[in-house]
Image (cartoon, rainbow, N blue to C red):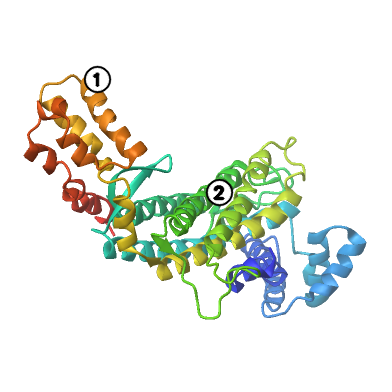
Amino acid sequence: MIERYSRPEMVKIWSPETKFKIWYEIEAYACEAQAKLGVIPIESVDAIWKAKDTEFDISRINEIEAETKHDVIAFLTHLAEIIGQDDARFVHQGMTSSDVLDTTLNIQLVRATDILLRDVDYLLEALKAKAYAFKDTIRIGRSHGIHAEPTTMGLTFARFYAEMNRNKERLLVARTEVSTGAISGAVGTFANIDPSVEEYVCKKLNITPETISTQIIPRDRHAAYFSTLGVVASSIENIAIEIRHMQRTEVLEAEEFFSKGQKGSSAMPHKRNPVLTENLTGLARLVRMSVIPALENVALWHERDISHSSVERAIAPDTTITLDFALHRLTSVIDNLVLYPDKMLENMNKFRGLIMSQRVLLALTQGGLSREKSYSLVQRNAMRVWQEGKDFETELLNDPEVLSVLSTKQIKEKFDLNYHTKHVNHIFERVFKTT
């Protein structure tokens, strides 16, 4: 992933230095386990562990790989140069390259997920703070982009909180899904390495032995993992789209913070554009881009082919790095979001009471009219508001058929905004009861 959309902590997980360090630890722990079984001299294990503080020479590994055309062999050859051939001959006993590659990939994914989970926690804190700050701030709810009925700004943030909280649970499941390792040999039969070695290595690295592997760890796990990241990305876009809508000139109920010296357009000095949330929409597309390839990686030939390998070398770092950046950016957007309650009220009153149509409809049916007749009466008056700019309450008060069912008082009370917020506390209790 390009530096522009990267954060150092996540990038480090996918660095060559980190990768080779994990490779080394897997090999060293495997040797340690085999020494306990009497397969490898304990003196050789001690010699292997002496390299634990060594900075592996990445250029040297690349040089060897250019000749061998095999990354794991290149690493093992370089390791032998460090610890000596006599002891190095015991490294990788009974193992296959995928034992190292797949176990390392999953360790990296687990570490990446820990960062993502922390990112989500920060975002949840920001959403919760905004939800309570604007819990009773009334704004118009919209369906199909059209005014529907009143809601509150707090409820908007509360539903985003609930969605992201579900995503946290999904990430926890996804973390468990990929928190496995395999040290089972060429086709997963443990023919040349004892199963206890796998158990030992996995315990040392805080992962779980894979139930059954072939030459690789099954890729349905990774398909589920990247699909989860795709869902999280879609939730990010869901929030970003709402903010982008609210910042539209015709709406302007909220906008991204516009810092001193910031410029919105090279041509139009007046512009204040929702560039951060537009960027988040784009980043969400990049994350979701990994989902289909991850799903297609599930179907491999027999015990393994390498059609999945090139895919994962790209999507594993790119997707986790991008999602980490996006979550961090969204949290900053929420923390600094500027909201305009007066504009929310102004927008809600734009069509002069029209948003109370359902209350009038229900009152007419309660008063004895059929639903069809009630709907016709309300719609007839509503269309005058749409087409002629009339006031909805006034129109109803001047409609003899409506007055034959509802009194003036009954009509007027249908325009009380508090009616629509009476259950806000109940909803908040359900959303935030465990947090």
Image height check: is 71 above or below 42?
Answer: above
Residue occupying the point 68% across, 71% down: 45
Q: CA distance from mark 2 to mark 1?
A: 44 Å
| Of the pair 154 and 377, the residue shown nearer to us | 377
Horizontal side of residue 19 vs 128, given as left or right: right
Determine the residue located farthest toward the right in the rendered image: 67
Amino acid carrying mark 1 in the image:
Glu
Task: Look at the image and tell me whether residue 121 can be seen.
Answer: yes
**Secondary structure category for the residue under label 1:** helix
Residue occupying the point 15% across, 36% down: 397
Q: Quadrant of the C terminus?
A: bottom left
Where does the image place residue 387, in percent across and percent down from the top left?
A: 36, 37
Where does the image place residue 379, in percent across and percent down from the top left?
A: 28, 29
Residue occupying the point 45% across, 49% down: 170
Amino acid carrying mark 2 in the image:
Gly
Horizontal side of residue 179 vs 342, given as left or right: right
What number is the disc on residue 372? 1
Q: Quadrant of the N terminus?
A: bottom right
Image height check: is 392 above or below 85?
Answer: above
Image height check: is 253 above or below 257?
Answer: above
Q: Which residue is mark 2?
A: 230
Where does the image place residue 105, in percent across and percent down from the top left?
A: 64, 57
Residue occupying the point 65% across, 63% down: 26
